[in-house]
Structures are given as C-alpha cells and as structure tokens.
Amino acid sequence: KQIADLKEECQNDVVQHTKVMSSFYNYLAKTSTAKIKLLNSEINRLDNIKKADEAMKAKNYKSAIDYFQNAEKARSIPSVQAKLEKAKEIYAPILAKEQEEERERQAEARQRQREEAKRRERELPQTAFEHLKGYLKSPRSASMNKYAINKINGCRTVVTLEVDSQNGFGAYIRNSFNVFFANGKPCYAKEGGLTEVGLFKNDYQGYRNLQE
C-alpha cells in the first residue's frame, strides 16, 4: 500500500510539474514573439530612416517625408522629428510650385476643351448637311441655304437646315430639315422645321436616338 501511495504521489508531482513547465514554455513563446515583433519594427524604422536620409541627399524630399513619417509611426525620436520638419520646410515651396503648375495644366485642359467645343459648334451646320445628304433623292445637287442651331433642354442639339436640291423629276425644290445630334454626332434627320420643344418630344425616333 505504501508503494502504491508513493507511486500515486509521484504521478501527481509529474502532472503538476508538466503543467508548470507548459505554462513556462507558453510564456517564453509569447515573450519571444513580442521581442521578435519589436525587433522587426525597429529594423523597419531604421531602414526607413536610412532611405529618408538617402532621399534627402538625392533631393527627393517628398519620398524623404514619407520615409521619416513611417519611421515616426514605429517610434518617435526627437532627432527624426527634426529631420522630418526640415524635409517639410524644404519641400513646402516645391509642393506649392507643383500645385500651381497642376492648376495651370488643368486650366489649359479646360481651355482646350472649350475651344474644341466651339470648333465642333462651328462645324455643326456642315456636319448636319453632310449627314442629311443620305436622306435626299439627289445629294450631289444639294446646297445649304440657311441653318439654325437649337438647344433642347440645354444639352441636346438640333440643327435646322434649309436645303435646295433636285427631286425625282429633276426640279429644284427647297425644304427644311431637322438633324438631331447625340453625343456630338448626327443620329437622325427629319423633314420639317423645329418650331417648339413639343414637336421634338413627339418625334419618337429622334427622341429615342438621343437617349442612346
């Protein structure tokens, strides 16, 4: 019986020791993971500082600011803060100039767009006339007499043309046509002058094409 009791006591000690050792190993593992994470963070911080210093030498101040800021996120140090502020100070007038140049580029692009829109508008009558020829009996005999440009709802364009052309019997007749535009291109033509918006809305085919 004494031997059995001693054996049981030893087994209990082994179990208890195993639990203690398991907890200790878990603690070491967590501590090691935290240390490794901290070490990697410090390595990345130092690497960012190195890259920032190299960017400063190359006068690439924007990249230098990014690298210094990344280093500061890991751990803030007065010496790095001073370098960051210096980089910002140097880059500030450069950034202002870049922004001004970008505003000028955008203004020039808008000006080009306005000029292109005016050019297209100047060409609208001739574009409408060329499209209309496909609807005439004798397109080669056609000549444009008058035209009018109308805006429907401020965005859809209709060009009304007064055209002289030969009919099927060879006689010259004068008719008015409406050429409807969608997305800057003629899409449909119909005989008759445009007198009001209601006429346009009742023209189902033209209205449908302008919606496409």
Image (tube, rainbow, N blue to C red):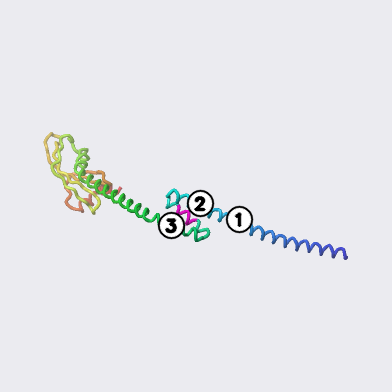
Taking the image as shown, residue 88 lies to the left or right of residue 19, namely left
Boundaries of the magenta span:
64-70
Q: Secondary structure at mark 2?
A: helix
Taking the image as shown, residue 32 lies to the left or right of residue 69, namely right
Where on the picture, by quarter, is residue 191? top left
In the rendered structure, find residue 50 and report the number of the disc placed on it: 2
Judging depth in this view, the residue of 37 and 96 nearest the camera is: 96
The nearer-to-camera label among 1 and 3 is 3
- Looking at the picture, does residue 35 appear above or below residue 209? below
Where is mark 3, residue-wise? 86
Badge 1 or badge 3: first in the primary sequence? 1
Q: Measured from the top left, where is residue 159 in percent x and y?
A: 19, 46
C-alpha distance separating marks 3 and 2: 16 Å
- Looking at the picture, does residue 7 appear above or below residue 104? below
Badge 1 or badge 2: first in the primary sequence? 1
Q: Measured from the top left, where is residue 120 in percent x and y?
A: 23, 45
Badge 3 or badge 2: first in the primary sequence? 2
Residue lying at 53% horizontally and 54% vertically, measured from the top left: 46
Residue lying at 80% horizontally and 62% vertically, measured from the top left: 11
Q: Main secondary structure of the magenta part?
A: helix
C-alpha distance separating marks 1 and 3: 32 Å
Where is mark 1, residue-wise? 36
Q: Secondary structure at mark 3?
A: helix
Callout 1 touching callout 3 (CB < 8 Å)? no
Q: Measured from the top left, where is residue 145 in percent x and y?
A: 13, 42
